[in-house]
Image (cartoon, rainbow, N blue to C red):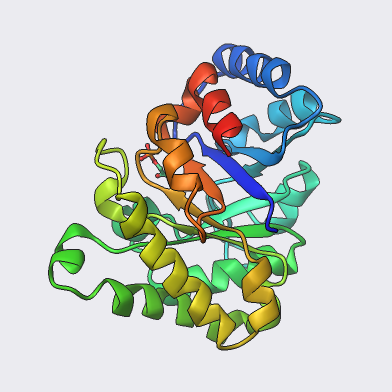
Amino acid sequence: MRRKFVAGNWKMHGGLARNRDLLDSLIKGIGGGGKADCAVCVPFPYLAQAQELLKGTAIAWGAQNCSEHPQGAYTGEVSAAMLADFGCRYAIVGHSERRSLYGERNETVAAKFVAAVDGGLTPILCLGETLEQREQGVTEQVIAAQFDAVLQAAGVHGFANAVIAYEPVWAIGTGRTASPQQAQDVHAFIRGRLASSDAALAQRMQILYGGSVKPQNAAELFGMADIDGGLIGGASLVAQDFLAICSAA
Ligand code: PGA
């Protein structure tokens, strides 16, 4: 039985005072931990704050991106080793906002995934199709290309300590969620693709769903056979909502 996992993606939201309130509420709400794993992926400047407040709690923390390079003259970039210095367990890689707004191609995402693994982090690899691609009926080809680029670069052993998130682009921040069955179909496809390389690992892999997960739809989504939790954007900024989603997992 795979453990459920719920990760918050704060995106570019927050501030010292507001984060403290939110994290205090999450710590109180989650206590010693529930049946699901829980993490928050915060903006880089707040990693020290997350480390200070979350150390010793049941809530892990991570970043939303990391450089594909280990170090060097890369102005504005942050390496996996730097994230590990702040106690990060996770780094989101390949979020659709990074792909679409910052031009990250499959090869870059793959290199970031490898850098995260090499730096001792657990990458949360995001895969997802746009609305146009879904309507053209090429969802599986798009997901396969995104996934295969990472598999090729990292090897199947690179997935031994990784999490995958299926995030249909058309469902992110739009209030339009994939139906549980639509999500389940893609999750099963991803698991099957990994199973072609390593069936046992595919069975263990946590595959999260992301895209307008709310307290009202979380339980139904997480009840699907291949959905192992969620990557939560907007609702992760509201303590009550995020806690309700964690309890649904
Ligand atoms: P959302 O974002 O929950 O606000 O749709 C999810 C994500 O982008 O990870």
Q: 69 above or below 171?
A: below
- 17 or 180: nearer the viewer: 180
The mark tally for this picture is 0
Q: Identify the residue at image location x=63%, y=84%.
A: 155
Q: Identify the residue at image location x=42%, y=48%.
A: 210
Task: Kindly indicate the quadrant of the structure image that contains residue 45.
Answer: top right
Residue 231 location in percent, x, y?
50, 45
- 33 or 248: nearer the viewer: 248
Please say whether residue 11 is visible from this viewpoint: no
Q: 188 above or below 64?
A: below
Q: 99 above or below 160?
A: above
Residue 120 location in percent, x, y?
77, 61
Q: Horizontal placement of 111 versus 104: left or right?
A: right
Q: Horizontal placement of 7 versus 71: left or right?
A: left
Residue closest to the far right? 56
Q: Horizontal placement of 29 versus 127: left or right?
A: right
Residue 58 location in percent, x, y?
78, 33
Q: Identify the residue at image location x=55%, y=53%.
A: 92
Q: In which quarter of the image is the N terminus?
A: bottom right
Q: 228 above or below 214?
A: below
Q: Quadrant of ligand 1?
A: top left
Residue 176 location in percent, x, y?
24, 41
Task: Kindly indicate the quadrant of the structure image that contains residue 139.
Answer: bottom left
Task: Kindly indicate the quadrant of the structure image that contains residue 195.
Answer: bottom right
